[in-house]
Amino acid sequence: MKRIVQAAALATAAAVTLGLAACSGPTEASTDSAAMIEPMAESASDLKVAFFQAGSSNAYLQANISAAEELATDLDITLDVFDAQWDAQTQADQIQSAITSGKYNAFMVLPVDGNLICDAITQDAIPSGILVSVLNVPICGLETEVGDATQAPGTVTFVGGQTRPVYESWVDQVIADHPEGGEIGLIAGPDLSANTITFFAAAEKLEENGFTIVGSQTTDYTTPQGYQAAQAMLSANPDLTVIMSNYSGVTLGVVQAVADAGRADGLDIYDVGGDEWGLEQVADGVLKNTVMLLPARETEEALQALADAADGKSVPAFINLAEDDSLPGTALVTSENVDEFTAEY
Protein backbone atom coordinates (compact mmCIF):
# COMPACT_ATOMS: atom_id res chain seq x y z
CA MET A 1 0.00 0.00 0.00
CA LYS A 2 1.32 3.40 -0.97
CA ARG A 3 2.53 5.58 1.90
CA ILE A 4 1.67 9.28 1.77
CA VAL A 5 3.24 11.98 3.93
CA GLN A 6 1.41 15.27 4.35
CA ALA A 7 2.32 18.23 6.59
CA ALA A 8 -0.74 20.47 6.32
CA ALA A 9 -4.45 20.49 7.09
CA LEU A 10 -6.89 18.86 4.67
CA ALA A 11 -7.57 21.68 2.28
CA THR A 12 -10.77 20.08 1.00
CA ALA A 13 -12.35 20.32 4.44
CA ALA A 14 -10.88 23.57 5.63
CA ALA A 15 -14.27 25.20 5.87
CA VAL A 16 -15.73 22.60 8.21
CA THR A 17 -16.75 24.16 11.50
CA LEU A 18 -15.30 22.45 14.53
CA GLY A 19 -18.37 22.79 16.75
CA LEU A 20 -16.69 21.23 19.76
CA ALA A 21 -16.45 22.00 23.44
CA ALA A 22 -13.55 20.76 25.54
CA CYS A 23 -14.31 17.36 27.00
CA SER A 24 -15.61 17.81 30.50
CA GLY A 25 -14.03 14.60 31.75
CA PRO A 26 -13.43 10.91 31.16
CA THR A 27 -16.80 9.83 32.62
CA GLU A 28 -18.81 11.83 30.12
CA ALA A 29 -16.65 10.70 27.21
CA SER A 30 -16.92 7.04 28.18
CA THR A 31 -20.71 7.09 27.92
CA ASP A 32 -20.67 7.91 24.22
CA SER A 33 -17.62 5.87 23.23
CA ALA A 34 -19.01 2.73 24.87
CA ALA A 35 -21.41 2.38 21.95
CA MET A 36 -18.65 2.48 19.29
CA ILE A 37 -19.20 0.43 16.15
CA GLU A 38 -16.72 -2.08 14.80
CA PRO A 39 -13.44 -0.55 13.52
CA MET A 40 -13.43 0.22 9.82
CA ALA A 41 -10.03 -1.45 9.38
CA GLU A 42 -10.29 -5.23 9.13
CA SER A 43 -6.53 -5.81 9.29
CA ALA A 44 -3.26 -3.88 9.57
CA SER A 45 -2.85 -3.95 5.80
CA ASP A 46 -6.08 -1.93 5.49
CA LEU A 47 -4.90 0.91 7.72
CA LYS A 48 -4.96 4.47 6.45
CA VAL A 49 -3.45 6.45 9.32
CA ALA A 50 -3.59 10.19 9.99
CA PHE A 51 -0.78 11.20 12.34
CA PHE A 52 -1.70 14.46 14.07
CA GLN A 53 1.63 15.85 15.22
CA ALA A 54 1.81 18.84 17.56
CA GLY A 55 4.67 20.34 15.57
CA SER A 56 7.90 19.65 13.75
CA SER A 57 10.07 22.48 15.04
CA ASN A 58 12.50 20.49 17.16
CA ALA A 59 14.60 17.33 17.03
CA TYR A 60 12.22 15.34 19.23
CA LEU A 61 9.21 15.91 17.00
CA GLN A 62 11.27 15.25 13.87
CA ALA A 63 12.42 11.93 15.38
CA ASN A 64 8.74 11.12 16.05
CA ILE A 65 7.87 11.67 12.42
CA SER A 66 10.87 9.83 10.95
CA ALA A 67 10.24 6.74 13.06
CA ALA A 68 6.55 6.70 12.14
CA GLU A 69 7.34 6.99 8.44
CA GLU A 70 9.90 4.19 8.59
CA LEU A 71 7.61 1.78 10.42
CA ALA A 72 4.69 2.65 8.13
CA THR A 73 6.86 1.64 5.19
CA ASP A 74 7.84 -1.61 6.88
CA LEU A 75 4.21 -2.44 7.69
CA ASP A 76 2.94 -1.26 4.29
CA ILE A 77 0.59 1.20 5.99
CA THR A 78 -0.60 4.47 4.45
CA LEU A 79 0.46 7.39 6.68
CA ASP A 80 -0.31 11.09 6.37
CA VAL A 81 1.34 13.51 8.83
CA PHE A 82 -0.45 16.70 9.88
CA ASP A 83 1.71 19.39 11.48
CA ALA A 84 -0.29 21.64 13.84
CA GLN A 85 2.71 23.96 14.35
CA TRP A 86 1.88 24.11 18.08
CA ASP A 87 -1.53 25.66 17.42
CA ALA A 88 -4.28 23.88 19.35
CA GLN A 89 -7.12 25.13 17.16
CA THR A 90 -5.26 24.15 13.99
CA GLN A 91 -4.91 20.60 15.30
CA ALA A 92 -8.56 20.46 16.32
CA ASP A 93 -9.57 21.61 12.82
CA GLN A 94 -7.25 19.04 11.22
CA ILE A 95 -8.82 16.23 13.24
CA GLN A 96 -12.39 17.29 12.50
CA SER A 97 -11.59 17.68 8.81
CA ALA A 98 -10.03 14.21 8.69
CA ILE A 99 -13.13 12.69 10.29
CA THR A 100 -15.38 14.48 7.80
CA SER A 101 -13.26 13.44 4.83
CA GLY A 102 -13.73 9.71 5.46
CA LYS A 103 -10.21 9.06 4.17
CA TYR A 104 -8.82 7.53 7.37
CA ASN A 105 -9.64 4.53 9.51
CA ALA A 106 -6.97 5.19 12.16
CA PHE A 107 -5.52 8.20 13.97
CA MET A 108 -2.27 8.69 15.88
CA VAL A 109 -2.45 11.83 18.00
CA LEU A 110 0.28 13.79 19.78
CA PRO A 111 -1.90 16.56 21.25
CA VAL A 112 -1.27 20.26 21.55
CA ASP A 113 -4.26 20.60 23.90
CA GLY A 114 -5.70 17.24 24.92
CA ASN A 115 -8.88 18.78 26.32
CA LEU A 116 -9.81 20.67 23.16
CA ILE A 117 -9.73 17.52 21.01
CA CYS A 118 -11.32 15.18 23.56
CA ASP A 119 -14.86 15.24 22.15
CA ALA A 120 -13.69 14.97 18.54
CA ILE A 121 -11.78 11.81 19.40
CA THR A 122 -14.12 10.10 21.88
CA GLN A 123 -17.50 11.19 20.53
CA ASP A 124 -16.86 11.55 16.78
CA ALA A 125 -13.83 9.55 15.62
CA ILE A 126 -14.10 6.41 17.78
CA PRO A 127 -17.88 5.86 17.42
CA SER A 128 -17.44 6.11 13.63
CA GLY A 129 -15.01 3.17 13.68
CA ILE A 130 -11.69 5.02 13.62
CA LEU A 131 -8.96 3.38 15.70
CA VAL A 132 -7.07 5.94 17.80
CA SER A 133 -3.77 5.78 19.66
CA VAL A 134 -2.57 8.74 21.72
CA LEU A 135 1.07 9.42 22.44
CA ASN A 136 3.28 11.62 24.60
CA VAL A 137 0.53 13.41 26.51
CA PRO A 138 -2.93 12.11 27.51
CA ILE A 139 -6.16 13.68 26.34
CA CYS A 140 -9.46 14.41 28.13
CA GLY A 141 -7.97 15.85 31.33
CA LEU A 142 -6.02 12.68 32.19
CA GLU A 143 -2.56 14.28 32.24
CA THR A 144 -1.99 13.73 35.97
CA GLU A 145 -3.44 10.20 36.05
CA VAL A 146 -1.25 7.13 36.47
CA GLY A 147 -0.93 3.85 34.57
CA ASP A 148 -3.98 2.53 32.70
CA ALA A 149 -5.99 5.56 33.87
CA THR A 150 -4.09 7.66 31.28
CA GLN A 151 -5.96 5.88 28.47
CA ALA A 152 -8.88 7.94 27.18
CA PRO A 153 -12.18 6.07 26.77
CA GLY A 154 -12.36 4.04 23.58
CA THR A 155 -8.80 4.70 22.44
CA VAL A 156 -6.53 1.77 21.59
CA THR A 157 -3.75 2.86 23.94
CA PHE A 158 -1.80 5.72 25.43
CA VAL A 159 1.97 5.66 24.87
CA GLY A 160 4.01 7.90 27.15
CA GLY A 161 7.24 8.39 29.05
CA GLN A 162 6.51 11.74 30.72
CA THR A 163 3.80 10.69 33.12
CA ARG A 164 3.34 12.10 36.59
CA PRO A 165 5.45 9.39 38.30
CA VAL A 166 8.37 10.28 36.01
CA TYR A 167 8.14 13.97 36.87
CA GLU A 168 7.75 13.15 40.55
CA SER A 169 10.92 11.02 40.54
CA TRP A 170 12.73 13.89 38.79
CA VAL A 171 11.56 16.31 41.47
CA ASP A 172 12.48 13.83 44.21
CA GLN A 173 16.05 13.72 42.89
CA VAL A 174 16.32 17.51 43.13
CA ILE A 175 15.08 17.35 46.73
CA ALA A 176 17.56 14.59 47.57
CA ASP A 177 20.44 16.55 46.03
CA HIS A 178 19.50 19.72 47.94
CA PRO A 179 18.31 18.78 51.44
CA GLU A 180 18.57 22.43 52.51
CA GLY A 181 16.29 23.57 49.70
CA GLY A 182 16.95 26.90 48.03
CA GLU A 183 15.62 29.12 45.27
CA ILE A 184 14.52 27.24 42.16
CA GLY A 185 13.27 28.22 38.71
CA LEU A 186 11.05 26.08 36.49
CA ILE A 187 11.13 26.29 32.70
CA ALA A 188 8.60 24.27 30.71
CA GLY A 189 7.03 23.94 27.28
CA PRO A 190 3.78 25.51 26.04
CA ASP A 191 1.06 26.58 28.48
CA LEU A 192 -1.54 24.08 27.27
CA SER A 193 0.81 21.11 27.08
CA ALA A 194 -0.05 18.28 29.47
CA ASN A 195 3.68 17.87 30.08
CA THR A 196 3.81 21.44 31.38
CA ILE A 197 0.75 20.86 33.56
CA THR A 198 2.20 17.62 34.93
CA PHE A 199 5.63 19.14 35.56
CA PHE A 200 4.24 22.10 37.49
CA ALA A 201 1.90 19.82 39.47
CA ALA A 202 4.78 17.54 40.48
CA ALA A 203 6.93 20.56 41.36
CA GLU A 204 4.49 21.66 44.07
CA LYS A 205 6.30 19.18 46.31
CA LEU A 206 9.41 21.38 46.16
CA GLU A 207 7.83 24.06 48.35
CA GLU A 208 7.10 21.42 50.99
CA ASN A 209 10.82 20.61 51.12
CA GLY A 210 12.53 23.93 51.68
CA PHE A 211 12.46 25.35 48.14
CA THR A 212 11.12 28.69 47.00
CA ILE A 213 9.90 28.64 43.39
CA VAL A 214 10.99 32.05 42.11
CA GLY A 215 9.64 31.59 38.60
CA SER A 216 7.63 29.20 36.40
CA GLN A 217 8.21 30.09 32.76
CA THR A 218 6.66 28.49 29.67
CA THR A 219 8.23 28.36 26.21
CA ASP A 220 7.65 27.00 22.72
CA TYR A 221 10.34 24.35 23.37
CA THR A 222 12.97 26.33 21.45
CA THR A 223 16.49 27.23 22.56
CA PRO A 224 16.06 31.02 22.20
CA GLN A 225 13.04 31.04 24.51
CA GLY A 226 14.90 28.83 26.97
CA TYR A 227 17.73 31.32 26.95
CA GLN A 228 15.41 34.28 27.50
CA ALA A 229 13.51 32.58 30.33
CA ALA A 230 16.71 31.61 32.14
CA GLN A 231 18.28 35.02 31.59
CA ALA A 232 15.28 36.72 33.21
CA MET A 233 15.37 34.34 36.19
CA LEU A 234 19.09 34.80 36.70
CA SER A 235 18.84 38.57 36.53
CA ALA A 236 16.00 38.76 39.04
CA ASN A 237 17.29 36.12 41.46
CA PRO A 238 20.97 36.37 42.46
CA ASP A 239 20.55 33.49 44.95
CA LEU A 240 19.04 31.06 42.46
CA THR A 241 20.19 27.52 43.30
CA VAL A 242 18.50 25.26 40.74
CA ILE A 243 16.88 25.46 37.31
CA MET A 244 14.67 22.62 36.07
CA SER A 245 14.00 22.55 32.32
CA ASN A 246 11.69 19.96 30.79
CA TYR A 247 13.14 19.71 27.27
CA SER A 248 16.78 19.48 26.19
CA GLY A 249 16.33 21.99 23.37
CA VAL A 250 15.20 24.53 25.96
CA THR A 251 17.94 23.45 28.36
CA LEU A 252 20.57 24.27 25.75
CA GLY A 253 19.47 27.90 26.05
CA VAL A 254 19.45 27.65 29.84
CA VAL A 255 23.04 26.39 29.91
CA GLN A 256 24.14 29.22 27.65
CA ALA A 257 22.37 31.85 29.77
CA VAL A 258 23.96 30.49 32.95
CA ALA A 259 27.39 30.52 31.32
CA ASP A 260 26.93 34.07 29.99
CA ALA A 261 25.93 35.22 33.48
CA GLY A 262 29.00 33.59 35.01
CA ARG A 263 26.76 31.55 37.30
CA ALA A 264 27.78 27.97 36.39
CA ASP A 265 29.41 27.40 39.78
CA GLY A 266 26.85 26.85 42.51
CA LEU A 267 23.82 26.49 40.26
CA ASP A 268 22.53 23.04 39.26
CA ILE A 269 20.60 22.44 36.03
CA TYR A 270 18.20 19.50 35.67
CA ASP A 271 16.91 18.40 32.28
CA VAL A 272 14.28 16.25 30.58
CA GLY A 273 15.10 14.94 27.13
CA GLY A 274 18.07 12.62 27.07
CA ASP A 275 19.21 13.61 23.58
CA GLU A 276 22.84 13.28 22.44
CA TRP A 277 23.71 16.75 23.70
CA GLY A 278 22.02 16.12 27.04
CA LEU A 279 23.87 12.87 27.67
CA GLU A 280 27.17 14.58 26.85
CA GLN A 281 26.39 17.40 29.27
CA VAL A 282 25.57 14.98 32.07
CA ALA A 283 28.83 13.12 31.44
CA ASP A 284 30.73 16.43 31.52
CA GLY A 285 29.01 17.61 34.71
CA VAL A 286 27.27 20.56 33.05
CA LEU A 287 23.85 19.03 33.76
CA LYS A 288 23.07 17.43 37.10
CA ASN A 289 20.84 14.88 35.36
CA THR A 290 18.45 14.30 32.48
CA VAL A 291 15.34 12.18 32.04
CA MET A 292 15.56 9.82 29.08
CA LEU A 293 12.92 10.29 26.38
CA LEU A 294 12.35 7.91 23.47
CA PRO A 295 10.67 9.76 20.58
CA ALA A 296 11.26 6.97 18.05
CA ARG A 297 9.93 4.25 20.32
CA GLU A 298 6.97 6.49 21.11
CA THR A 299 5.62 6.62 17.57
CA GLU A 300 6.67 3.05 16.79
CA GLU A 301 4.65 1.77 19.73
CA ALA A 302 1.65 3.96 18.85
CA LEU A 303 1.60 2.83 15.22
CA GLN A 304 2.24 -0.82 16.08
CA ALA A 305 -0.65 -0.67 18.55
CA LEU A 306 -2.99 0.43 15.74
CA ALA A 307 -1.73 -2.41 13.54
CA ASP A 308 -2.20 -4.95 16.33
CA ALA A 309 -5.69 -3.66 17.14
CA ALA A 310 -6.69 -3.86 13.46
CA ASP A 311 -5.46 -7.48 13.43
CA GLY A 312 -7.56 -8.24 16.50
CA LYS A 313 -4.63 -8.57 18.88
CA SER A 314 -4.67 -7.41 22.50
CA VAL A 315 -3.04 -4.03 23.16
CA PRO A 316 -2.10 -2.65 26.61
CA ALA A 317 -4.16 0.32 27.78
CA PHE A 318 -0.92 2.11 28.67
CA ILE A 319 2.52 1.57 27.16
CA ASN A 320 5.06 2.96 29.63
CA LEU A 321 8.20 4.16 27.86
CA ALA A 322 9.86 4.84 31.21
CA GLU A 323 10.03 1.05 31.56
CA ASP A 324 11.11 0.33 27.99
CA ASP A 325 13.54 -2.57 27.53
CA SER A 326 16.08 -0.18 26.00
CA LEU A 327 16.52 1.53 29.38
CA PRO A 328 18.72 0.17 32.19
CA GLY A 329 15.85 -0.08 34.69
CA THR A 330 15.49 3.69 35.06
CA ALA A 331 14.82 6.75 32.91
CA LEU A 332 16.88 9.01 35.17
CA VAL A 333 20.35 9.66 33.76
CA THR A 334 23.14 10.71 36.14
CA SER A 335 26.91 10.90 35.90
CA GLU A 336 27.06 7.44 37.49
CA ASN A 337 24.95 5.64 34.85
CA VAL A 338 25.15 7.86 31.75
CA ASP A 339 27.24 5.27 29.86
CA GLU A 340 24.29 2.86 30.01
CA PHE A 341 22.07 5.07 27.82
CA THR A 342 21.88 5.62 24.06
CA ALA A 343 20.12 8.71 22.72
CA GLU A 344 17.40 8.34 20.05
CA TYR A 345 17.80 11.88 18.74
Image: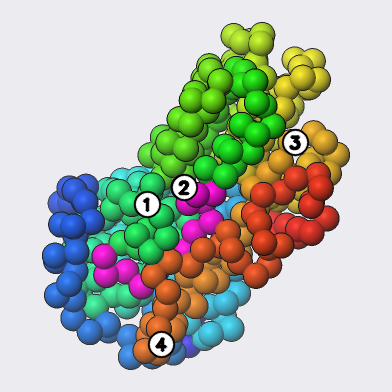
Residue hosting label 3? 287
Helix, strand or loop at label 3? It is loop
When the figure is inspected, residue 138 is found, relative to residue 201, above or below; the finding is: below
Q: Check disc 4 and report the residue beneath it.
A: 313
Marks 4 and 1 sit apart, C-alpha to C-alpha, by 25 Å
Against 191, residue 149 (above or below) is below
Name the residue nearer the viewer: 100 or 259.
Answer: 259
Q: Which residues are magenta?
A: 153-166
* Image quadrant where residue 149 sits: bottom left
CA gap between label 4 and label 2 equals: 28 Å
Q: In the rendered structure, which disc, 1 or 3, sits on the residue that comes first in sequence?
A: 1
Quadrant holding the C terminus: bottom right
Q: Earlier in the sequence, mark 2 or mark 1?
A: 1
Determine whether label 2 and label 1 are within 8 Å by CB.
Answer: yes
Is residue 260 toward the left or the right of residue 53 in the image?
Answer: right
46 lies above or below 256: below
Residue 62 is situated, as x and y percent measured from the top left of the image, at: 59, 56
Amino acid identity at mark 1: Glu
Question: Secondary structure under badge 4?
Answer: loop
